[in-house]
Amino acid sequence: RITYFCDFIKARYGIKVVIGTHPIPQKYYDMHKMLGTWDSPKWEEIIQPTLADEKTRLSYN
């Protein structure tokens, strides 16, 4: 879905979508881990630039 959203924004508005502009907040990280929504190679690739250490993630809560 995220790749569809990125493609849509680019096609509709002509702007590039940038993923990974800030670290994932710890509360989002915990919820997605619990739900298993990021348990795939594609998602691991997508979130890799935003995975910081726990201290940094907590500062973004």
Image (tube, helix red, strand yellow):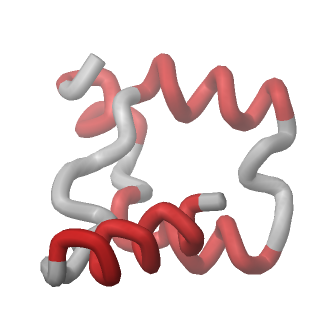
**In the rendering, at what x and y percent does residue 43 appear?**
67, 66
- Residue drawn where x is 16% and y is 82% of the image: 14
Name the side, left or right, on which 41 lies relative to 11. right
Q: Looking at this view, is 3 or 52 the one in front?
A: 3
Against 59, residue 45 (above or below) is below
Quarter of the figure that contains the N terminus: bottom right
Against 36, residue 38 (above or below) is below
Instruction: Report the residue that reaches farthest toward the front.
Output: 12
- Residue drawn where x is 19% and y is 81% of the image: 16
**In the rendering, at what x and y percent does residue 3 appear?**
56, 73
Quarter of the figure that contains the C terminus: top left
Q: Looking at this view, is 55 or 14 the one in front?
A: 14
Name the side, left or right, on which 22 lies relative to 23. left
Q: Looking at this view, is 2 or 31 the one in front?
A: 2
**In the rendering, at what x and y percent does residue 51 appear?**
42, 57
Name the side, left or right, on which 16 lies relative to 1. left
Q: Looking at this view, is 29 or 43 the one in front?
A: 43
**In the rendering, at what x and y percent does residue 21 appear?**
18, 60
- Residue drawn where x is 83% and y is 29% of the image: 35
- Residue drawn where x is 29% and y is 79% of the image: 10
Question: How many labels, in total?
Answer: 0
Name the side, left or right, on which 10 lies relative to 13. right
Against 21, residue 24 (above or below) is above
